[in-house]
Image (cartoon, helix red, strand yellow):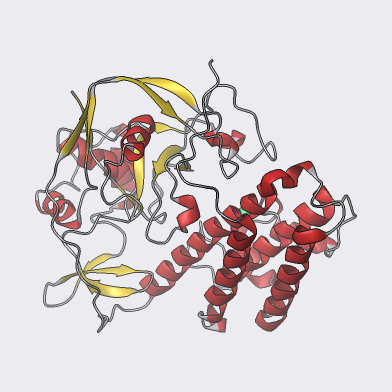
Amino acid sequence: MNAIHPLSNASEPDLMECLSVQHDRLNAAMEDTPKHQWRNQYHPDLSPMAWHYAHCHFIEAVWLHERVLGRSPLARRDWHDLYIPELSPKWRRGGRLPPPEELLDWGRACQTRHLDLLRDAPGVRSHPLLAQDYLTGFLAQHHAMHLESLEQVRWFARLRRPATLDTHTPDPCTYSPEEWIEHPGGEAVVGSEAITAFDNERAAHRVRLEPHAVCARPVTNAEMLAFIEAGGYRPGPHWDTGGATWLQKTGVAAPLGWHSLPDGTRVQTLPDGTRPLDPHAPVVGISWFEASAYARWRGARLPHEHEWEQARRGGHLRGAGQAWEWCGNTFHPYPGFRPYPYEEYSKPWFDNQHYVLRGGSTWSDPLLKRPAMRNFFTPEKRHVFAGVRLARKL
Ligand SMILES: [Fe+2]
C-alpha cells in the first residue's frame, strides 16, 4: 500500500487543555446529580455514575504511575478489582463504591497530581507514550466516552420516573428535504494518521467505492412516526432474521424514550427532559435492527462506513453529530492494523458481532466527532444515542 498523507483537516487541539476540560466535565456531571443516584444501576449495560467517575481517575493513575513511570500500583489492590472492567461484574459495582464526598475529593486530588505529572515530571515527558501528547489525548477521549455513558445513565434515571413535560422547549429543528448525494464510485481515502486517532482508525488508506447515494440528512422523528403508523414495528419482510427474532423477543414498538401523554400527544424523554416530539429532529434511541428495518422498508439500506466517511469529508452530510449513525458493516481491522496502546482496545471487538457507528451524538464531546472516528456496538443496543441515515446503490 502506498503511504498516504495524514488526513487531519484541522490543526491538532491542545491535548493538555482537552484533558483538563474532561476533568472539569466529570466533576460537574457528578455535582449536578443528586447523591442518592450516584451508586444506582439503571440498566444492565450501564454502570453507576460514580463508577464511571472513579474508573476514569483510576485508569489515569494506572497509565501514569504503573505504565509510564514503572512504579508499583499506588492505589489499593482491591480498587483494581473494582475499577478494571474485566475484573468487575457490572451488577456488583454500585455496592462497592466509596461514599460520594470521599470519591469526589479523591478524584480532584488525582486530577491535580496527574496534570502536574503530565506537564513536567522527569521520565514522563520523555516517555514514548507522551510523544505529541498521545497518552494525554487518549485519556481525554477515554473520559469523553465515559461522559457520554454518564448521559446514558441520566437518560435511564429519567425514564424510570413518570414523565412530566418540561416547561422549557428548545427551538425546534427546521425542515430539511430528503436530498441524496450521489457518488459515481471509485477510489476514496479513509482512516487517519492524526495523533488523536485510535488504533482502529489507522492507517489512512485507499478503498474502492461502488456507485451509491447517501442521504444528505439523517432520518427524522416524523419519518420514524410514519413508519410506526404504517405498522413498521410489526413483523414483515423488512425485518431480517436477526431483527425479527429481536422484535418478537422485546416487543419494541417505538424508539427508546418515546411515549404518549393521556391526551395523545407524542413526547420524547431525553437525558435533559421530556418534550413534545420534534418532527424534524434526527431520530435517536434505535437499535441496528430498527435502523436496518426502517431502511429496507424505504427501499434503501444503511451506508457502509467508508461511504459515510467519504461524504462527511466532502462536507455533504447535514445533521452529522446529533445522533450516532448505524452503518451497514461490522467493525473490522483496517489493513496493517496494529493494536495500540494495548492489545484489547479494539481487537476483541473485531468479532463480526459489532456494527460501526459514525458521527457522534448531541451528547458526544467535539473531540469524538471527527470524520474517521469509529464507534461500535452489538445490533440490539438502544441506549447509545443512535439513529440512522439512508443510503442506496446507484
Ligand atoms: Fe474505560
* Residue 374 seen from this side: yes
Counting from the top left corner in percent of width and height, residue 358 is at 40, 43
Which quarter of the figure has residue 163?
A: bottom left
Image quarter in which the N terminus is found: top right
Q: Is residue 322 above or below residue 325?
A: below
Counting from the top left corner in percent of width and height, residue 237 is at 18, 33
* Residue 238 seen from this side: no
Image quarter in which the C terminus is found: top left
- From the viewer's perspective, is 157 left or right of 342? left
Q: Is residue 113 above or below residue 18?
A: below
In the rendered image, the residue lying farthest to the top is 1
| Viewer-side residue, 34 vs 17 | 17
Q: Residue at x 53, y 68 (%)?
A: 41
| Viewer-side residue, 318 vs 339 | 318
Please tell me in which quarter of the rendered image ligand 1 is found.
bottom right
Q: Residue at x 57, y 83 (%)?
A: 35
Q: How many marks?
A: 0
Counting from the top left corner in percent of width and height, residue 128 is at 77, 41
Counting from the top left corner in percent of width and height, residue 341 is at 69, 40
In the rendered image, the residue lying farthest to the front is 11
Q: Residue at x 75, y 64 (%)?
A: 114
Q: Is residue 239 above or below residue 126?
A: above
- From the viewer's perspective, is 346 left or right of 366? right
Which quarter of the figure has residue 181?
A: top left
Q: Is residue 161 above or below residue 184?
A: below
- From the viewer's perspective, is 280 left or right of 67? left
